[in-house]
Image: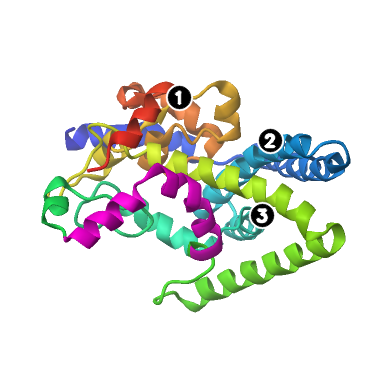
Amino acid sequence: MSREKTLELRKNVKPFENSELRKSIFQLINTIPPFFTLWFLAYLSLDVSVWLTVGLSVIAAGFVVRIFIIFHDCTHGSFFKNKKANNITGTITGIISLFAYEKWKREHNIHHATSGNLDKRGVGDIWIMTVEEYVEASLMKRLSYRLYRNPIVMFGLGPALLFLVSNRFNRKDARPKERNNTYLINISVIVIYSLMIWLIGWQAFAIIQGTILFIAGTLGIWLFYVQHQFEDSYFEVEAEWDYVKAAVDGSSYYKLPKVLQWVTGNIGFHHVHHLSPRVPNYNLEKAHESTPPLQQATTINLRTSLQSIRFRL
């Protein structure tokens, strides 16, 4: 892609970067209250059937994914025009989704700035090795890599490691603002969880919240994985790396059924998001449909996305 076409592509997407207060507020209303309502109904249903409770918890997990997308937009400063509104909303949705706002904002911005860059891997991304690196790696490193990329570990144990370990601790070089935000979110989670356990008992809380976090975590990891791990995805060394190519060729268009597209906050239009992180989630589809070059991005669906599990190097 020539420099002229690159500039034109980014120019075409720019009009969709403006957030709209009405749409953002409406999204908060149709996402957060339904989640708490489903949580309460799941608790009431324990007197009827534990399977009904689990079913309602699974649906609630979908709303946690949607809450995370709002959190995600706030980290990019795209959900509201006002920075303070993004920070407050991001912190609150971070408490609900168990993500440290400032910590994840920093790591995720690094991910955007280095996605597909083979010389800048390791922050905010999924561990991936080249064939040459794997061949030259020690036996222990190969085993570690195979274990890490095993679907049972990544999508089964991954949510627990994400929520209990990765999201709870700051990096060594974290600044005071980032550290304090993580402490605030951790303390808030401990207080809220302790209060809920005291009110309804640890068994009921474990069944409901445990199911919600496991399903939401698995879905979240899957979405992040499949949006960058596909055949012919873009990877280049620093000297050859290009931001726009990494966005359009290194991020997939995950074409989902409308219900799942709504639940996942249009994040399937990941190529648009990586090209312009300032586009709020409710404008991603419009940007895709209004920009013909973006429609040439690699398109995967529910069936073809399962092939990504085989792509490891």
Question: Which quarter of the picture shows residue 51?
Answer: top right
Distance of mark 3 from mark 1, alpha carbons?
27 Å
At 27% from the left and 34% from the top, the residue drawn is 249
Give the labeled residue for mark 2: 59
Labels 3, 1: front one: 1
User: Could you say which quadrant of the image residue 291 lies in?
Assistant: top left
Q: Is residue 230 left or right of residue 214?
A: left
Check disc 2: other Cα within 10 Å, few if <14, some if 14-19, many if 20+. Answer: some
Examine the rendering and report whether any part of residue 22 can be seen: no
Q: In this picture, is 60 found above or below 291?
A: below
Give the mark, 1 or 2, whose residue is nearer the N terminus: 2
Tag 2 near tag 3, CB within 8 Å:
no
Q: Is residue 145 above or below residue 215?
A: below
Task: Please provide percent x and percent y for residue 213.
Answer: 62, 49
Q: Secondary structure at mark 1?
A: helix
The residue that mark 1 highlights is: 302
Query: Residue tagged by mark 3?
Result: 96
User: CB of mark 1 within 8 Å of CB of mark 2?
Assistant: no
Q: Secondary structure at mark 2?
A: helix
Q: What percent of the width, then of the height, locates residue 157?
A: 49, 52
Q: Which residues are magenta?
A: 138-165
* Quadrant including the N terminus: top left
Q: Is residue 160 magenta?
A: yes
For badge 1, the amino acid type reads Leu
**Label 3 residue SS:** helix
